[in-house]
Image (cartoon, grey):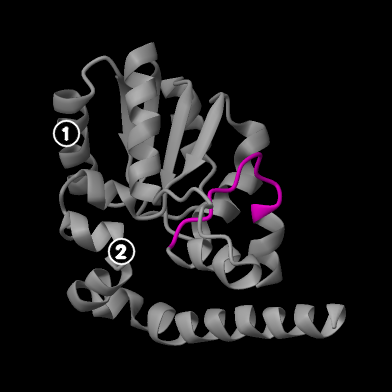
Amino acid sequence: NISYLNNLLKFDLIHPDGIGMKLVPLVLSHNSSVPYITGSDFYIKIFEQLNHNKNSIILFGDKEEILKKMIEVIKMNYPKIVIKGFIQGYRDLTDKSIVNEINDLNASFLFVGLGAPRQEEWITKNISLLNSKKIIAVGGWFRVLSNDRKRGPNWVQKVGLEWFVRLITEPRYVWKRYLFGIPLFIFRIVELKISSLRKYN
């Protein structure tokens, strides 16, 4: 998806989530020491820092009920974060009033949870119009923090099998991504490895 890639390249920082990102250096360079952190854990670290600094945030994406649950969790676990407001994501994303609503709320950090590639497309189209200092795309993380989606036991998280838990619990949403995407990803990594071996032999 060239359009999605181009949108990603416009971001200041890209966090490569997924256990596959740990396997790539292992397969290509036999390096198993590359640091790895899941998106869910990474966003928690961000929230801890925002809480420490008493920063202000806006939540944009998902359903209103999910956002309200998330706000309850934030108030309980990160009481120093200033929640300026939320905007549900089940609406016409071309509606220009969304940008106006966000700017009126006037927060330093904007978290966008529209799912890929919609969130990246929306951010790149509107970033020049937004007054938030930092804009962070978080995919479906709102549902994780709101406890609407379970991550699985700690041992599952450590061995990188959260994707399998989600395949079992939410097959309707992810079966294509995992059943077709994972084999294709592995094939491309192996193909790249073979290509590099031929190049240097």
Residue drawn at point x = 63 percent, y = 32 percent: 129
Magenta stretch containing residue 10, yes or no? yes
Q: Is residue 139 visible?
A: yes
Residue 89's spot in the image, x, y percent? 37, 50
Residue at the image point whose x is 59% and y is 48% from the top: 14
Q: Which residue is labeled 2 in the image?
A: 159
Residue range in magenta is: 8-18
Query: For the point 45% across and 22% down, which residue is it?
Result: 104
Query: Mark 1 against mark 2, which lies toward the viewer?
Result: 2
Q: Which percent across, then down, holds residue 150?
A: 17, 57
Of the numbered discs in the image, which one, if any, rests on residue 7?
A: none
Are there few (<14), some (14-19), or many (20+) residues within 10 Å of tag 2? few
Numbered label attached to residue 73: 1
Which quadrant: the N terminus?
bottom right
User: Horizontally, is 178 left or right of 171 in the view?
Assistant: right
171 relative to 33 in the view: left or right? left
